[in-house]
Image (cartoon, grey):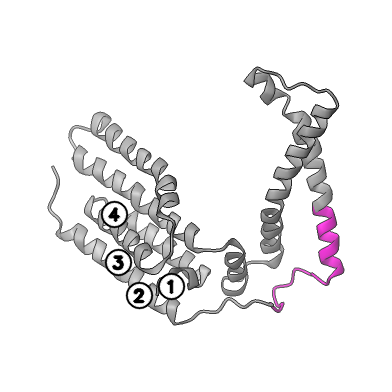
Amino acid sequence: MRQWLHRMNPSIKFVIITISMMTMAFFFNPWTPLVFFFGVVLFQLAFAKVSWKIWGLMMLPFLLGAVGYFWTTLVFGNDNADPLGTALSLSFRVLAFSSLSLLFVFTTKPVDFILSLMQQLRLSPKIAYSILVGYQFLPVLKDEFVQIQQAQELRGIVKPKSPVKRVLTMRHVLIPMLAGAVRKAERTAFAMEARGFTGESDRTFYRRAAIGRTDIWMTIMFLALVLISIYAGIMGPAIQ
């Protein structure tokens, strides 16, 4: 049960989270996003294994953003409207949206998500595998960046002390790195074509992204949370 969110089909999870966000956008009272935020946190406590230390660090910028929204709306808001209620609504909405985003990030593997997009949402394999290859190249590009910097230092190129000059001379590292990335992408494309990749959608998959009972139960619980949040917003006291 602690792994339900991890076992959930990524496409179903993506659709449910998108629908939840769009629904929250239509409610401007502070109670609906507040209840939804606590509900999402409870879901992660009950149905996911999350490092709460990392979760707190990732949530910190959003918390600061929520405080900023609250303060600027309260200070610079329209006096004729309800500034406190509007400020709280905007702040809680930031927390609700960010908690949903972190839920998806912490409980979804990128490769499984792309495979599920191809199988359930009919994403073109050409786009899907391009994203996967780009994702796999990120650590390679980081290593190449360090190697090019070290090679230039061995040839006697001195790093400028000024941060502005250092940024301006960054092109001497980025241009060869991007040229190498283009060559690697070309080789990867040739290798995929040599192995029979055509980009057609009617292909078979070694790993199937199935939809099971866990997805049905989690969908019901997410929809129930949305309805409870809406009800709390309708029945909650007005904040003046």
Amino acid bearing label 4: Pro
Residue designated by label 4 = 33
Q: Is residue 209 above or below residue 182?
A: below
Q: Bounds of the magenta span?
A: 185-205
Residue pictured at 80% horizontal, 47% vertical: 182
> Which image quadrant: the C terminus?
top left
Tag nearer the camera, 1 or 2: 1
Say if the magenta span includes residue 192: yes
Residue pictured at 43% horizontal, 45% vertical: 57
SS for dot 3: helix
Amino acid bearing label 1: Trp
> Which image quadrant: the N terminus?
bottom left
Q: Callout 1: few (<14), some (14-19), or many (20+) C-alpha neighbours within 10 Å?
A: some
Residue 43: percent from the left, percent from the top?
35, 65
Residue 153: percent from the left, percent from the top?
80, 27
Q: Callout 3: few (<14), some (14-19), or many (20+) C-alpha neighbours within 10 Å?
A: many
Instruction: Report the Cα–Cα distance between label 2 and label 3.
Output: 9 Å
SS for dot 2: helix
Quick check: 75 left or right of 102?
A: left
Tag nearer the camera, 3 or 1: 1
Say if the magenta span includes residue 4: no
Tag nearer the camera, 4 or 1: 1
Residue designated by label 2 = 220
Residue found farthest to the bottom: 213
Amino acid bearing label 2: Ile
Q: Is residue 161 above or below residue 232?
A: above
Instruction: Report the Cα–Cα distance between label 1 and label 2.
Output: 13 Å
Q: Earlier in the sequence, mark 3 or mark 1?
A: 1
SS for dot 1: helix
